[in-house]
Image (tube, rainbow, N blue to C red):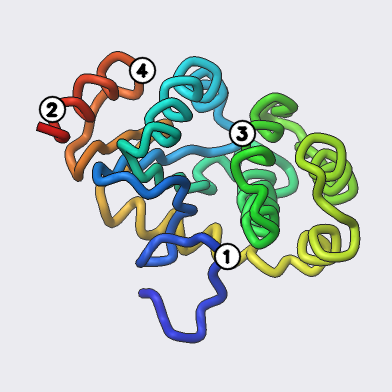
């Protein structure tokens, strides 16, 4: 499914289906949708642990921004937010922007944030610039990438968000379970 001509953002995983944060020996894959309220809760509860494990050099965190919930938005918000996060990755600001997207998560059933709002959020919360980031969002440079990420996740068996794998094995998406699975993988 990944072709040599597929545009993938900076910091992408080997398959191009996620953004890698950190370089530790244990891979933690987190499949999320920026419109998913449970993903927002996961971000709020698990981010401190994941940051700690990345900073300690224990994990490589691969975040897969999916477009599962497009039908719960009138403007394909999940796809557009995932694409905007890829634009942020190109400027080395993926993590900060992803956090901001969850912090400013719109309700399901509406349009979500418009492109101008996505750009302003990036400027305000992640220090992203209008020239590079704004142009990337407005051009829709990574709209196809969001679909690719989602398709590969479905092939892997991901059927809900958030879904977490530690060293290739699925684990419940909660900090303590993730901590225990990482610890076991490091032995």
> What residue is shown with label 2?
184
10 Å crowding of disc 1: few (<14), some (14-19), many (20+): many
Residue 116 image point, x, y percent:
90, 48
Mark found first going from the N terminus, 4 or 2: 4
Question: In front of the other: label 1 or label 2?
Answer: 2
- Identity of the residue drawn at 48% across and 61% down: 12
- Whole-angstrom CA distance, mark 1 to mark 2, is 31 Å
Q: Is residue 60 left or right of residue 156?
A: right
Residue 54 image point, x, y percent:
42, 36
Quarter of the N terminus within the rendering: bottom left
Front residue of 150/24: it is 24
10 Å crowding of disc 4: few (<14), some (14-19), many (20+): some
- The answer to whether the residue labelled 4 contacts the one labelled 1, judged by CB atoms less than 8 Å apart, is no
Mark found first going from the N terminus, 4 or 1: 1
Mark found first going from the N terminus, 3 or 4: 3
Quarter of the C terminus within the rendering: top left
- Whole-angstrom CA distance, mark 3 to mark 2, is 32 Å
- Identity of the residue drawn at 25% across and 46% down: 25
- Whole-angstrom CA distance, mark 4 to mark 2, is 14 Å
> What residue is shown with label 4?
175
Vertical order, 52 against 151 (above or below): above
Q: What secondary structure is found at the residue carrying circle 2? A: helix
Residue 92 image point, x, y percent:
64, 54
> What residue is shown with label 3?
35
- The answer to whether the residue labelled 3 contacts the one labelled 4, judged by CB atoms less than 8 Å apart, is no
- The answer to whether the residue labelled 1 contacts the one labelled 2, judged by CB atoms less than 8 Å apart, is no
- Label for residue 9? 1
Image quadrant in which you'd find residue 152: bottom left
- Identity of the residue drawn at 23% across and 30% down: 182
Mark found first going from the N terminus, 1 or 3: 1
Q: Is residue 153 left or right of residue 127?
A: left
């Amino acid at each position: 499914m990944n072709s040599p001509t597929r545009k993938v953002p900076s910091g992408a995983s080997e398959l191009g289906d996620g953004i890698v944060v950190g370089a530790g020996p244990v891979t933690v894959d987190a499949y999320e949708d920026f419109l998913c309220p449970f993903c927002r809760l996961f971000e709020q509860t698990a981010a401190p642990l994941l940051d700690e494990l990345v900073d300690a050099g224990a994990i490589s965190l691969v975040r897969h921004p999916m477009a599962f919930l497009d039908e719960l938005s009138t403007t394909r918000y999940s796809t557009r937010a995932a694409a905007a996060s890829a634009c942020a990755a190109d400027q080395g600001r993926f993590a900060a922007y992803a956090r901001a997207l969850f912090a400013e998560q719109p309700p399901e059933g509406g349009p979500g944030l418009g492109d101008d709002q996505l750009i302003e959020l990036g400027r305000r919360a992640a220090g992203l610039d209008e020239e590079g980031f704004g142009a990337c969002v407005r051009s829709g440079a990574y709209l196809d990438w969001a679909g690719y990420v989602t398709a590969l996740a479905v092939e892997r068996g991901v059927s809900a968000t958030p879904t977490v794998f530690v060293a290739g094995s699925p684990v419940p998406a909660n900090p303590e379970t993730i901590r225990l699975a990482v610890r076991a993988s490091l032995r």
